[in-house]
Image: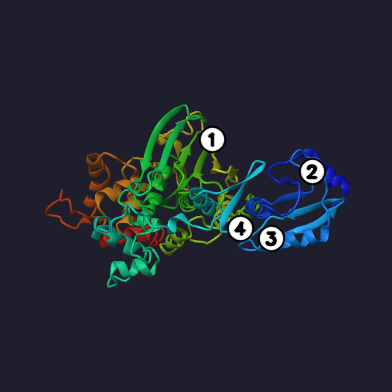
Amino acid sequence: MNRQALNDLLALGEGFTTEFKKAGTSGLGRELCAFANATGGVILIGVTDAGEVVGVADHNKLKSDVQATARSAEPPIAVEVESAGNVLCVTVPAQHSKPYSFGGKFYLREGASSQQMSRQEIREFFYREGLIHFDETPCERFSLEEDLSDEAWATFRRRARIPAEMPPLTALKNLHLLTDDGRMTHAGAWLLARDIQKFSISADVGCALFMGTDKVHILDRRGFHGDVYSMIDEVMAWLLSKLNVAYIIKHVKREERPELPEEALREAVVNALVHRDYRSTANVHVYVFKDRVEVVSPGGLPAGMSEADLGIKSIPRNPLLFGMLHRMEAVEHIGSGIRRIRRLCAEYGVADPEIELSPNWFVLRFPRTVVGEEAGQEPPASHDTEVGEQDEARAAPSRHQVGTKSALSRHQVAILVKCLEDQAITELMAVTGRLDRTKFRKQVLAPLLEEALLEMTIPDKPRSSKQRYRLTERGRRYLQEHAPEPNDKDA
């Protein structure tokens, strides 16, 4: 270090990255450890707390003592030691094996001083540095006797493609969703939850539709708090119901084209739930404004990632949850979330999404094309536009209009896809975002049953609590002729 660099440090005084030490190595291990656990720093030996240079003698011996102290840390700390006149400069570069301890204690730099960390601070430090993953820790509120119900297990087993003959506890342990002492992890609790807020109070998703471009007037608000997998489907159903749709007529078939790419929106919702900080008291939000859609996730970027890394590498904050959703095919491409979203938007011909970052939040913003003065509000039929090749095929139904067998609504097609496996009415209502069960039966289900596209599993007891709905052979033929081939994720 040259004289000018030394003078600059002296002029700035002690701070987060600079420490003055009058002489010797007493307490040096504490300072080295604190800098190593932060962003690094410089210790000037031979300078008083007031910034007066008093110097030190026998630099060679002191250098040796400094290196010995640094090697005594756990793990050893790499330091650079050099003389600047009669001052010994000890530089602690940014370290990559955090956390560091000295004498069995952990220290952290706070302002211009080094403080021993409390147990809670150590725990928080480990989480922040990605050394402990919250999703892998035991969920004390989950009871295997009460919460691992037959219904919850059957749904989870189907989604995770677990052999029917395998005992639940064996499968859960092999998937690392149970700890060695038989407790459910948070990841397991979130995937098996009937109500996720029972296990993590802020793990739900809040959705809101606003009039205009600010949050002054709310037109619709919904909260979703089932298991993580179900919340993805439910949030997407709600979100798509709020966007404008173009009906494209090709020959005699009608295709629906939402104003924003559904796959990109789904990827954003999945990323928000997979990579969020579940220890935060905030929840994931999906906002629909006149000019944009925002997906807001608490937690910022995981440790070890910068904005430049987005779309290039993946460091999941919740690797166990991430791995399970990949197994369930809710996450399709590991490490390609942001890159894939950008590609999908480009291919769809819409604006590139915007990213807003802070230490506590990650916001992905999809610009919307404003259509008339009412864009951004829940679109009436006039906001469902139609482009066709034949003039006689220009009578597309509105978003909530119920179709017939030859022209089903988008929600009815989604219900047919959902009913590739037996479904309860509540699961089908979630697809449409409807709350009124009576109207749903009359306006949505009844036409499908009358056209023999769906059937009841207990036809002689239509209102049975165990009633389920399934696709008929005629319904399967309809999907093959009029809809894309569904995959397991959509079922």
Q: CA distance from mark 3 to mark 4?
A: 9 Å
Residue 482 in percent (x, y) is at 38, 56
User: Dot 3: what SS?
Assistant: helix
Q: In the displayed orientation, state which residue is furthest to the bottom.
A: 165
User: Dot 1: what SS?
Assistant: loop
Q: Is residue 152 left or right of residue 298?
A: left
Q: Is residue 425 above or below residue 49?
A: below
Asked whether the beta carbons under mark 3 and mark 4 sit within 8 Å of each other, the answer is no
Q: Is residue 180 above or below residue 292?
A: below
Instruction: Check disc 2 and report the residue beneath it.
Output: 9
Q: Is residue 411 above or below residue 490?
A: above
Compare marks 2 and 3 and give the one earlier in the sequence: 2
| Amino acid residing under circle 2 | Leu
Compare marks 3 and 1 and give the one earlier in the sequence: 3
Label number found at residue 70: 3
Residue 296 in percent (x, y) is at 50, 42
User: Dot 2: what SS?
Assistant: helix
Q: Nearer the viewer, residue 409 or 249?
A: 409
- Can the viewer see residue 330? no
Asked whether the beta carbons under mark 4 and mark 1 sit within 8 Å of each other, the answer is no
